[in-house]
Image (cartoon, rainbow, N blue to C red):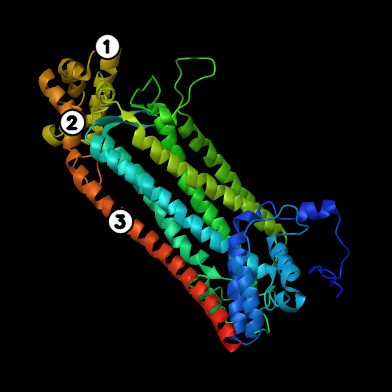
Amino acid sequence: MRKSKRMDIRGPRLRKPSDEALHFTSSMAADGRIARHVIVVNLAHMLALARANEVDAATASKCTRFLLSASSMVNPEAEAEDFHQQLEQDAVDKLGVETAGFLNYGKSRNDQVATAIRMELRVLTLDLLTGIVVLQHALLDLAKKEGATLVPGYTHLQRAQPVTLAHHLLAYFDSFQRDAERLNQLYPRVNLSPMGSAALAGTSVRVDRPFVAELLGFSAPVRNSIDAVSSRDFAAEAASCAVLTMTDASRLAEELILWSSKEFGFVEFADAYSASSSIMPQKKNPVTAEMVRAKSGSVLGSLVSILTILKALPYTYNLDLQELTPHLWHAFDDAISSVNVLAGTIRSMTVNAEAMQTSFEGDTSTAVGLANFLVAKEGFSFRQAHAIVGELVRASIEKGISLPRATAKYLPRASSKFGRKLTISEAKAERILDPKAFLASIATEGGSKPSSIPSGIAQRRKELSSNLKMISTRRASLNASQRKLSRTAKGLSREVKTKI
């Protein structure tokens, strides 16, 4: 019996493309990220065809068995435009076109790739959410351990007012919480199935779109077939979420880099998250934080690339969209690795509480406390008190004496400019200007009062529990859909064997 000639699924409409053109347009180098999803999408689609009697059970069973055993490894030697073509060509080669020729019945690479991208992105979204939670845990644990330690607060990178270390760390926790909330809100927009949209207009083949969506773990189909295959705003939104997360991570990394310097000396990185110099034996460089800072720029570049590719594309599908997807993966790879390594950096670093405390010696960052005292206890308006204390600070700097000493010596002269000659002892001025007393006097909710640390940490622990529960619920839903898909496929095989 003569062996039948191999059928090229690209068909006879065009001659074989040049090697240069095929290599230039091929997405094989990037398709490894979605290959396993492509196989699952084909499986769900075939089950839908069998369910609707669009394909007979025997044919569907052979196709599903092939798909269940198919490798998700991309073959770089394959003469294929993408993994979608490689998979179907392998099926035709192994099963024959009479059977495998039904794999693409009622679907297109357009709806298939859009679906596979969404499937990978929802996994990455949950991975990034998990990384953020791990980082938030590290911040909370450090806040609990070292939180009562006082640290200088800065505006314009100049000494402003003292805060507790816990208050500072909780500020970062809250910014990352908003990042988590954005990803949480993004997920439902990603978790919609394009399958059944075919190339752009839908299909006359009876594909039960909600059934396919359910098998693939989606909450529902994308309602418009054109929108389903051509829209990538979900990718741009996802990348923007990654950018905002990385912006917060970069700011934290930058601050840790500053704090680890000799000039600050507030923290020391663990050796495991540092590097030495190739020439200077004394060096200990904060390389992990530096890379987080750098990768924030890379993620931003990915978002700009995505938006630039999208901005002038007419509906519906254009191959330009293929160039967009690697930028999405790069953005999430960098964001996930960055929050994870930043969490490890924070967990392992040493806080120098003594250096933080010593930094307040000769400091004037509680000057507003003295101004508030003059308003509350002595009846000056705040603007008058501001001017009085400003003069005292200047005298302290010019005379090279402490602010309490300058207050005792020069307050009578400064206050007399506003009609009253006021005197405060140096000891009393020290009590008013003491950083701990300053923080204890804070009355506003959300401020850096040390007594609010335990309740602030407890409240945020609840938020973390909610984040973890949401992540767990969504992962469980994806796992349940995978089990249902597997049961449905195996059920089809059993049904065919029974009939035989």
Q: Secondary structure at mark 1?
A: loop
Foreground: disc 2 or disc 1: 2
Ranked by sequence position, the earlier of labels 2 and 3 is: 2
Q: Residue furthest right?
A: 15
Depth check: give the residue in front, 367 or 257. Answer: 257
Depth check: give the residue in front, 461 or 179. Answer: 461
Location of mark 2 (residue): 436
- Disc 3 residue type? Ser
User: How far apart, in angstroms, are the residues tagged by discs 2 and 1?
Assistant: 24 Å
Foreground: disc 2 or disc 3: 3
Q: Residues within 10 Å of mark 3 (few under 14, many from 20)?
A: few
User: How far apart, in angstroms, are the residues tagged by discs 1 and 3?
Assistant: 52 Å
Determine whether, in the image, residue 87 is placed left or right of residue 459.
right
Q: Secondary structure at mark 3?
A: helix
Q: Residues within 10 Å of mark 1 (few under 14, many from 20)?
A: few
Ranked by sequence position, the earlier of labels 2 and 1 is: 1
Residue in the picture at 46% in, 47% down? 245
Location of mark 1 (residue): 400
Considering the image in quadrants, where does the C terminus appear? bottom right
Residue in the picture at 53% in, 74% down? 213
Foreground: disc 1 or disc 3: 3
